[in-house]
Image (cartoon, helix red, strand yellow):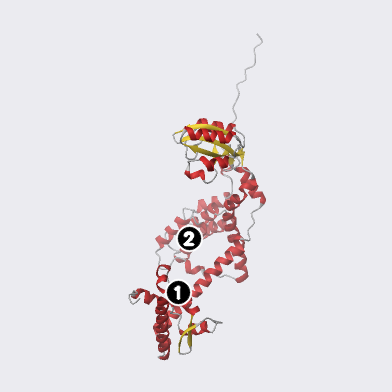
Protein backbone atom coordinates (compact mmCIF):
# COMPACT_ATOMS: atom_id res chain seq x y z
CA UNK A 1 0.00 0.00 0.00
CA UNK A 2 2.93 2.33 0.50
CA UNK A 3 3.47 2.32 -3.25
CA UNK A 4 0.35 4.44 -3.86
CA UNK A 5 1.28 7.20 -6.32
CA UNK A 6 1.92 10.73 -5.14
CA UNK A 7 -0.68 11.80 -7.71
CA UNK A 8 -3.35 9.76 -5.91
CA UNK A 9 -2.41 11.22 -2.53
CA UNK A 10 -2.48 14.79 -3.83
CA UNK A 11 -5.77 14.11 -5.54
CA UNK A 12 -7.31 12.94 -2.27
CA UNK A 13 -5.97 15.99 -0.48
CA UNK A 14 -7.35 18.28 -3.18
CA UNK A 15 -10.71 16.54 -3.11
CA UNK A 16 -11.13 17.67 0.46
CA UNK A 17 -9.96 21.20 -0.06
CA UNK A 18 -13.33 22.42 1.19
CA UNK A 19 -11.65 22.73 4.57
CA UNK A 20 -12.13 21.93 8.23
CA UNK A 21 -15.19 24.15 8.56
CA UNK A 22 -16.93 22.09 5.91
CA UNK A 23 -15.91 18.92 7.70
CA UNK A 24 -17.43 20.29 10.90
CA UNK A 25 -20.63 21.15 9.06
CA UNK A 26 -20.86 17.66 7.56
CA UNK A 27 -20.10 16.01 10.86
CA UNK A 28 -22.94 17.89 12.54
CA UNK A 29 -25.42 17.28 9.69
CA UNK A 30 -27.24 14.31 11.20
CA UNK A 31 -24.28 12.01 10.51
CA UNK A 32 -24.93 9.02 12.77
CA UNK A 33 -22.49 6.66 11.07
CA UNK A 34 -19.58 5.09 12.92
CA UNK A 35 -16.85 7.48 14.07
CA UNK A 36 -13.44 6.36 12.79
CA UNK A 37 -11.26 9.14 14.20
CA UNK A 38 -11.34 12.60 15.74
CA UNK A 39 -9.13 15.58 14.99
CA UNK A 40 -9.76 18.20 17.63
CA UNK A 41 -13.52 18.68 17.52
CA UNK A 42 -13.88 17.11 14.09
CA UNK A 43 -15.28 13.57 13.89
CA UNK A 44 -14.32 11.58 10.81
CA UNK A 45 -17.01 8.98 10.12
CA UNK A 46 -17.77 6.12 7.72
CA UNK A 47 -20.11 8.44 5.83
CA UNK A 48 -17.32 10.96 5.29
CA UNK A 49 -14.95 8.25 4.08
CA UNK A 50 -17.57 7.09 1.56
CA UNK A 51 -18.09 10.67 0.38
CA UNK A 52 -14.36 11.00 -0.19
CA UNK A 53 -14.33 7.69 -2.06
CA UNK A 54 -17.02 8.96 -4.41
CA UNK A 55 -14.77 11.90 -5.37
CA UNK A 56 -11.99 9.58 -6.53
CA UNK A 57 -11.97 8.69 -10.25
CA UNK A 58 -13.33 5.16 -10.83
CA UNK A 59 -10.04 3.90 -12.28
CA UNK A 60 -8.31 4.67 -8.94
CA UNK A 61 -11.17 4.08 -6.52
CA UNK A 62 -10.59 0.35 -6.07
CA UNK A 63 -7.25 1.13 -4.43
CA UNK A 64 -9.10 2.75 -1.52
CA UNK A 65 -12.09 0.42 -1.22
CA UNK A 66 -10.21 -2.30 0.68
CA UNK A 67 -9.86 -2.08 4.49
CA UNK A 68 -6.18 -1.17 4.06
CA UNK A 69 -7.06 1.41 1.42
CA UNK A 70 -9.72 3.02 3.64
CA UNK A 71 -7.18 3.24 6.45
CA UNK A 72 -4.74 4.96 4.12
CA UNK A 73 -7.51 7.32 3.03
CA UNK A 74 -8.35 8.03 6.66
CA UNK A 75 -4.70 8.92 7.31
CA UNK A 76 -4.73 11.37 4.40
CA UNK A 77 -7.93 12.99 5.70
CA UNK A 78 -6.40 13.32 9.15
CA UNK A 79 -3.31 14.93 7.64
CA UNK A 80 -5.47 17.32 5.68
CA UNK A 81 -7.52 18.33 8.72
CA UNK A 82 -4.37 18.89 10.77
CA UNK A 83 -2.91 21.11 8.09
CA UNK A 84 -6.13 23.07 7.75
CA UNK A 85 -6.43 23.62 11.47
CA UNK A 86 -2.90 24.92 11.72
CA UNK A 87 -3.33 27.11 8.64
CA UNK A 88 -6.35 28.77 10.21
CA UNK A 89 -4.55 29.06 13.51
CA UNK A 90 -1.81 31.02 11.70
CA UNK A 91 -4.39 33.38 10.21
CA UNK A 92 -3.73 32.24 6.65
CA UNK A 93 -7.41 32.75 5.80
CA UNK A 94 -6.42 36.40 5.25
CA UNK A 95 -3.54 35.55 2.92
CA UNK A 96 -3.93 37.27 -0.46
CA UNK A 97 -3.68 33.98 -2.37
CA UNK A 98 -6.37 32.34 -0.24
CA UNK A 99 -8.66 35.36 -0.58
CA UNK A 100 -8.13 35.42 -4.34
CA UNK A 101 -8.96 31.72 -4.65
CA UNK A 102 -12.10 32.09 -2.55
CA UNK A 103 -13.23 35.08 -4.61
CA UNK A 104 -12.61 33.13 -7.81
CA UNK A 105 -14.66 30.21 -6.49
CA UNK A 106 -17.48 32.59 -5.55
CA UNK A 107 -17.43 34.05 -9.07
CA UNK A 108 -17.58 30.55 -10.54
CA UNK A 109 -20.56 29.69 -8.32
CA UNK A 110 -22.29 32.92 -9.33
CA UNK A 111 -21.58 32.21 -13.00
CA UNK A 112 -22.95 28.66 -12.69
CA UNK A 113 -26.08 30.00 -11.00
CA UNK A 114 -26.58 32.58 -13.78
CA UNK A 115 -26.19 29.92 -16.47
CA UNK A 116 -28.71 27.68 -14.71
CA UNK A 117 -31.15 30.58 -14.34
CA UNK A 118 -30.87 31.51 -18.02
CA UNK A 119 -31.33 27.92 -19.19
CA UNK A 120 -34.32 27.38 -16.90
CA UNK A 121 -35.98 30.67 -17.88
CA UNK A 122 -35.48 30.08 -21.61
CA UNK A 123 -36.83 26.54 -21.41
CA UNK A 124 -39.84 27.28 -19.20
CA UNK A 125 -40.82 30.80 -20.29
CA UNK A 126 -39.84 30.73 -23.96
CA UNK A 127 -39.60 27.20 -25.42
CA UNK A 128 -42.37 25.63 -23.32
CA UNK A 129 -44.57 28.73 -23.73
CA UNK A 130 -44.68 28.41 -27.51
CA UNK A 131 -47.57 26.44 -28.96
CA UNK A 132 -47.37 25.84 -32.70
CA UNK A 133 -50.67 26.89 -34.33
CA UNK A 134 -52.60 23.95 -35.75
CA UNK A 135 -53.01 25.77 -39.05
CA UNK A 136 -49.21 26.01 -39.39
CA UNK A 137 -48.86 22.27 -38.80
CA UNK A 138 -51.56 21.50 -41.35
CA UNK A 139 -50.06 23.90 -43.91
CA UNK A 140 -46.60 22.34 -43.58
CA UNK A 141 -48.07 18.83 -43.77
CA UNK A 142 -50.11 19.62 -46.89
CA UNK A 143 -47.11 21.29 -48.56
CA UNK A 144 -45.06 18.10 -48.18
CA UNK A 145 -47.60 15.34 -48.79
CA UNK A 146 -45.90 14.42 -52.05
CA UNK A 147 -42.27 14.55 -50.88
CA UNK A 148 -41.27 14.33 -47.22
CA UNK A 149 -44.38 12.46 -46.10
CA UNK A 150 -44.91 10.31 -49.17
CA UNK A 151 -44.14 6.62 -48.69
CA UNK A 152 -43.80 3.86 -51.23
CA UNK A 153 -45.57 0.54 -50.62
CA UNK A 154 -43.73 -1.55 -48.03
CA UNK A 155 -43.96 -5.01 -46.52
CA UNK A 156 -42.59 -6.20 -43.20
CA UNK A 157 -40.86 -9.54 -43.73
CA UNK A 158 -39.44 -12.43 -41.71
CA UNK A 159 -37.45 -15.33 -43.13
CA UNK A 160 -35.91 -18.67 -42.29
CA UNK A 161 -32.57 -19.57 -43.89
CA UNK A 162 -31.02 -23.04 -44.16
CA UNK A 163 -27.96 -24.13 -46.13
CA UNK A 164 -28.78 -27.71 -47.12
CA UNK A 165 -31.51 -29.29 -49.22
CA UNK A 166 -32.21 -31.83 -46.49
CA UNK A 167 -32.91 -29.13 -43.92
CA UNK A 168 -34.96 -27.20 -46.47
CA UNK A 169 -37.19 -30.27 -46.79
CA UNK A 170 -37.60 -30.36 -43.00
CA UNK A 171 -38.59 -26.66 -43.00
CA UNK A 172 -41.16 -27.25 -45.75
CA UNK A 173 -42.63 -30.17 -43.80
CA UNK A 174 -42.88 -28.15 -40.59
CA UNK A 175 -44.62 -25.25 -42.35
CA UNK A 176 -47.03 -27.62 -44.14
CA UNK A 177 -47.80 -29.23 -40.81
CA UNK A 178 -48.96 -25.86 -39.50
CA UNK A 179 -46.05 -25.00 -37.22
CA UNK A 180 -45.79 -21.28 -36.57
CA UNK A 181 -43.21 -19.41 -38.59
CA UNK A 182 -41.50 -18.22 -35.39
CA UNK A 183 -41.10 -21.79 -34.12
CA UNK A 184 -39.68 -22.89 -37.49
CA UNK A 185 -37.17 -20.05 -37.38
CA UNK A 186 -36.18 -21.01 -33.85
CA UNK A 187 -35.78 -24.67 -34.79
CA UNK A 188 -34.05 -24.41 -38.16
CA UNK A 189 -32.80 -20.94 -39.17
CA UNK A 190 -29.07 -20.64 -39.67
CA UNK A 191 -29.12 -16.85 -40.17
CA UNK A 192 -27.47 -15.65 -36.98
CA UNK A 193 -28.47 -11.93 -37.18
CA UNK A 194 -32.22 -12.74 -37.31
CA UNK A 195 -32.69 -16.21 -35.85
CA UNK A 196 -33.19 -14.84 -32.32
CA UNK A 197 -35.86 -12.34 -33.45
CA UNK A 198 -38.22 -14.65 -35.32
CA UNK A 199 -36.35 -14.08 -38.60
CA UNK A 200 -37.40 -10.41 -38.72
CA UNK A 201 -35.84 -8.57 -41.70
CA UNK A 202 -37.79 -5.35 -41.08
CA UNK A 203 -39.58 -3.25 -43.67
CA UNK A 204 -38.81 -3.75 -47.34
CA UNK A 205 -39.60 -1.13 -49.99
CA UNK A 206 -40.58 -2.25 -53.45
CA UNK A 207 -37.70 -2.35 -55.96
CA UNK A 208 -35.16 -1.69 -53.18
CA UNK A 209 -32.41 -4.04 -51.94
CA UNK A 210 -33.49 -6.45 -49.24
CA UNK A 211 -31.66 -6.52 -45.90
CA UNK A 212 -28.75 -8.98 -45.98
CA UNK A 213 -29.81 -10.23 -49.45
CA UNK A 214 -29.36 -7.22 -51.71
CA UNK A 215 -31.25 -6.91 -54.99
CA UNK A 216 -33.82 -9.75 -55.24
CA UNK A 217 -36.38 -8.88 -57.92
CA UNK A 218 -38.15 -12.26 -57.93
CA UNK A 219 -38.39 -12.49 -54.15
CA UNK A 220 -39.54 -8.85 -53.86
CA UNK A 221 -42.30 -9.37 -56.43
CA UNK A 222 -43.55 -12.48 -54.59
CA UNK A 223 -43.58 -10.69 -51.23
CA UNK A 224 -45.53 -7.69 -52.51
CA UNK A 225 -48.04 -10.04 -54.15
CA UNK A 226 -48.51 -11.99 -50.88
CA UNK A 227 -50.95 -11.19 -48.12
CA UNK A 228 -50.21 -10.82 -44.42
CA UNK A 229 -49.37 -14.26 -43.00
CA UNK A 230 -48.71 -15.86 -46.38
CA UNK A 231 -45.62 -18.03 -46.84
CA UNK A 232 -43.41 -17.50 -49.90
CA UNK A 233 -40.66 -19.90 -50.92
CA UNK A 234 -38.45 -21.69 -51.13
CA UNK A 235 -36.04 -19.27 -52.85
CA UNK A 236 -32.40 -20.10 -53.43
CA UNK A 237 -29.74 -17.39 -53.02
CA UNK A 238 -25.99 -17.43 -52.51
CA UNK A 239 -26.73 -17.72 -48.79
CA UNK A 240 -28.86 -20.84 -49.05
CA UNK A 241 -32.59 -21.64 -49.08
CA UNK A 242 -35.15 -19.15 -47.79
CA UNK A 243 -38.80 -19.17 -46.80
CA UNK A 244 -40.46 -15.80 -46.16
CA UNK A 245 -43.61 -14.59 -44.49
CA UNK A 246 -45.23 -11.14 -44.65
CA UNK A 247 -46.04 -9.89 -41.16
CA UNK A 248 -47.37 -6.41 -42.05
CA UNK A 249 -48.01 -4.15 -45.05
CA UNK A 250 -48.17 -0.41 -45.76
CA UNK A 251 -49.86 0.90 -48.86
CA UNK A 252 -48.45 3.61 -51.08
CA UNK A 253 -49.44 7.14 -50.07
CA UNK A 254 -48.89 9.88 -47.53
CA UNK A 255 -48.09 9.07 -43.94
CA UNK A 256 -50.92 10.05 -41.53
CA UNK A 257 -50.64 13.48 -39.91
CA UNK A 258 -50.58 12.11 -36.37
CA UNK A 259 -47.68 9.87 -37.30
CA UNK A 260 -45.54 12.82 -38.40
CA UNK A 261 -46.95 15.56 -36.14
CA UNK A 262 -44.01 15.49 -33.72
CA UNK A 263 -41.44 15.82 -36.51
CA UNK A 264 -43.38 18.77 -37.97
CA UNK A 265 -43.48 20.48 -34.58
CA UNK A 266 -39.73 19.91 -34.16
CA UNK A 267 -39.16 21.45 -37.59
CA UNK A 268 -41.36 24.51 -37.06
CA UNK A 269 -40.69 25.23 -33.41
CA UNK A 270 -37.16 26.74 -33.54
CA UNK A 271 -38.26 29.54 -35.90
CA UNK A 272 -41.42 30.27 -33.92
CA UNK A 273 -39.52 30.18 -30.63
CA UNK A 274 -36.92 32.61 -31.96
CA UNK A 275 -39.62 34.99 -33.24
CA UNK A 276 -41.48 34.82 -29.92
CA UNK A 277 -38.23 35.48 -28.04
CA UNK A 278 -37.19 38.45 -30.20
CA UNK A 279 -40.60 40.00 -30.88
CA UNK A 280 -42.42 39.36 -27.59
CA UNK A 281 -40.20 38.35 -24.67
CA UNK A 282 -37.35 40.85 -25.14
CA UNK A 283 -39.64 43.87 -25.83
CA UNK A 284 -41.77 42.92 -22.81
CA UNK A 285 -38.74 42.66 -20.53
CA UNK A 286 -37.26 45.86 -21.98
CA UNK A 287 -40.45 47.74 -21.13
CA UNK A 288 -40.68 46.08 -17.73
CA UNK A 289 -37.15 46.79 -16.54
CA UNK A 290 -36.14 49.72 -18.74
CA UNK A 291 -33.11 49.77 -21.01
CA UNK A 292 -31.04 52.80 -21.97
CA UNK A 293 -28.14 52.65 -24.41
CA UNK A 294 -25.51 55.32 -24.86
CA UNK A 295 -25.62 55.34 -28.65
CA UNK A 296 -22.92 58.02 -28.84
CA UNK A 297 -20.47 55.48 -27.45
CA UNK A 298 -20.80 53.50 -30.69
CA UNK A 299 -20.27 56.38 -33.12
CA UNK A 300 -16.98 56.69 -35.00
CA UNK A 301 -14.31 58.33 -32.91
CA UNK A 302 -13.73 62.04 -33.50
CA UNK A 303 -10.21 61.23 -34.61
CA UNK A 304 -11.55 59.44 -37.71
CA UNK A 305 -10.47 61.20 -40.88
CA UNK A 306 -13.28 62.77 -42.97
CA UNK A 307 -12.58 60.59 -46.02
CA UNK A 308 -12.81 57.43 -43.89
CA UNK A 309 -16.07 58.55 -42.31
CA UNK A 310 -17.56 59.43 -45.71
CA UNK A 311 -16.50 56.06 -47.16
CA UNK A 312 -17.95 54.20 -44.15
CA UNK A 313 -21.30 55.89 -44.71
CA UNK A 314 -21.29 54.95 -48.40
CA UNK A 315 -20.44 51.31 -47.60
CA UNK A 316 -23.44 51.06 -45.27
CA UNK A 317 -26.11 52.58 -47.51
CA UNK A 318 -27.53 49.25 -48.68
CA UNK A 319 -26.70 46.91 -45.82
CA UNK A 320 -27.46 49.26 -42.90
CA UNK A 321 -29.16 52.44 -44.18
CA UNK A 322 -30.09 53.72 -40.70
CA UNK A 323 -26.43 53.81 -39.69
CA UNK A 324 -25.43 55.28 -43.07
CA UNK A 325 -27.82 58.22 -42.51
CA UNK A 326 -26.37 58.69 -39.03
CA UNK A 327 -22.82 58.70 -40.40
CA UNK A 328 -23.70 61.21 -43.15
CA UNK A 329 -25.20 63.48 -40.48
CA UNK A 330 -22.09 63.09 -38.37
CA UNK A 331 -19.90 63.95 -41.39
CA UNK A 332 -21.86 67.14 -42.10
CA UNK A 333 -21.80 68.09 -38.41
CA UNK A 334 -18.06 67.58 -38.04
CA UNK A 335 -16.93 68.77 -41.47
CA UNK A 336 -19.54 71.29 -42.77
CA UNK A 337 -16.99 72.96 -45.06
CA UNK A 338 -15.52 69.80 -46.50
CA UNK A 339 -15.63 69.47 -50.29
CA UNK A 340 -17.85 66.38 -49.93
CA UNK A 341 -20.29 67.90 -47.42
CA UNK A 342 -22.88 68.79 -50.11
CA UNK A 343 -22.61 65.27 -51.53
CA UNK A 344 -23.06 63.78 -48.06
CA UNK A 345 -26.21 65.89 -47.64
CA UNK A 346 -27.62 64.58 -50.94
CA UNK A 347 -26.71 60.96 -50.17
CA UNK A 348 -28.41 61.25 -46.80
CA UNK A 349 -31.65 62.20 -48.54
CA UNK A 350 -31.16 59.53 -51.20
CA UNK A 351 -30.63 56.82 -48.54
CA UNK A 352 -33.75 57.93 -46.65
CA UNK A 353 -35.79 57.88 -49.85
CA UNK A 354 -34.54 54.89 -51.81
CA UNK A 355 -33.34 52.50 -49.08
CA UNK A 356 -35.66 53.38 -46.21
CA UNK A 357 -38.78 54.76 -47.93
CA UNK A 358 -38.91 57.64 -45.44
CA UNK A 359 -39.95 60.34 -47.89
CA UNK A 360 -40.74 62.95 -45.23
CA UNK A 361 -37.25 62.91 -43.74
CA UNK A 362 -35.73 62.60 -47.22
CA UNK A 363 -37.51 65.78 -48.36
CA UNK A 364 -36.11 67.64 -45.34
CA UNK A 365 -32.57 66.40 -46.15
CA UNK A 366 -32.86 67.43 -49.82
CA UNK A 367 -34.21 70.85 -48.84
CA UNK A 368 -31.26 71.34 -46.47
CA UNK A 369 -28.96 70.70 -49.43
CA UNK A 370 -30.79 73.36 -51.48
CA UNK A 371 -30.71 75.87 -48.59
CA UNK A 372 -27.18 75.24 -47.27
CA UNK A 373 -25.34 74.43 -50.50
CA UNK A 374 -27.10 76.45 -53.25
CA UNK A 375 -24.05 76.24 -55.54
CA UNK A 376 -23.92 72.42 -55.40
CA UNK A 377 -24.17 70.40 -58.57
CA UNK A 378 -26.72 68.25 -56.71
CA UNK A 379 -29.33 71.02 -56.26
CA UNK A 380 -31.19 70.14 -59.47
CA UNK A 381 -31.17 66.46 -58.49
CA UNK A 382 -32.46 67.31 -55.02
CA UNK A 383 -35.33 69.36 -56.46
CA UNK A 384 -36.20 66.50 -58.82
CA UNK A 385 -36.16 64.00 -55.96
CA UNK A 386 -38.47 66.18 -53.86
CA UNK A 387 -40.99 66.29 -56.71
CA UNK A 388 -40.79 62.63 -57.73
CA UNK A 389 -40.02 60.56 -54.60
CA UNK A 390 -42.24 57.51 -54.36
CA UNK A 391 -43.50 57.79 -57.92
CA UNK A 392 -43.40 54.41 -59.71
CA UNK A 393 -40.63 54.40 -62.33
CA UNK A 394 -42.99 53.39 -65.08
CA UNK A 395 -44.95 56.59 -64.48
CA UNK A 396 -41.89 58.81 -64.92
CA UNK A 397 -40.80 57.79 -68.40
CA UNK A 398 -43.81 57.50 -70.71
CA UNK A 399 -42.91 58.07 -74.31
CA UNK A 400 -45.36 60.10 -76.31
CA UNK A 401 -46.03 58.16 -79.47
CA UNK A 402 -47.61 60.21 -82.25
CA UNK A 403 -50.80 58.73 -83.68
CA UNK A 404 -50.39 56.74 -86.86
CA UNK A 405 -51.97 58.44 -89.82
CA UNK A 406 -53.88 55.93 -91.83
CA UNK A 407 -53.84 56.36 -95.60
CA UNK A 408 -57.48 55.79 -96.43
CA UNK A 409 -58.12 55.56 -100.15
CA UNK A 410 -61.64 56.13 -101.23
CA UNK A 411 -62.86 53.29 -103.39
CA UNK A 412 -63.21 54.22 -107.00
CA UNK A 413 -66.55 54.25 -108.64
CA UNK A 414 -65.46 51.68 -111.15
Q: Earlier in the sequence, mark 1 or mark 2?
A: 1
Disc 2, SS: helix
Residue 74 position in % (x across, y down) = 42, 81
- Percent position (x, y) of residue 200? 54, 43
- What residue is shown with label 1? 53
Residue 3, percent across and down? 32, 75
The answer to which image quadrant residue 409 occupies is: top right
How far separated are the C-alphas under marks 1 and 2? 68 Å
Q: List the residue tagged with mark 2.
A: 328
Q: Nearer the viewer, residue 127 or 230?
A: 230
Q: At x 43% / y 68%, what residue is drawn? A: 58
Nearer-the-camera pick, 294 or 394: 294
As drawn, is 89 to the left or to the right of 220?
left
Image quarter where the C terminus lies is top right
- Relative to 71, does residue 175 appear above or below in the rendering? above
The answer to which of 137 and 399 lies nearer the viewer is 137
Q: Secondary structure at mark 1?
A: helix
Amino acid sequence: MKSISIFAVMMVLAAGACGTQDTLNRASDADTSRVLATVGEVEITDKMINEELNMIPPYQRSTYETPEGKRLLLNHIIERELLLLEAMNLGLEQDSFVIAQVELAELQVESARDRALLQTFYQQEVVDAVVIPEEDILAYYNDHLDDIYYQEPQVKVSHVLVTSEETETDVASALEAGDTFESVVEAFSEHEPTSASGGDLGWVTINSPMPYLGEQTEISAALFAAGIGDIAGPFETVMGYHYFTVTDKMDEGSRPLEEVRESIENTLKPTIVNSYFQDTVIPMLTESYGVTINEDAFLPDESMEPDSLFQSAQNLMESNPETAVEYYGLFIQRFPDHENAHQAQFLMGFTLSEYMGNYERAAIAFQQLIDNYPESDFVDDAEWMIENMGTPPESLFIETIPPIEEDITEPSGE
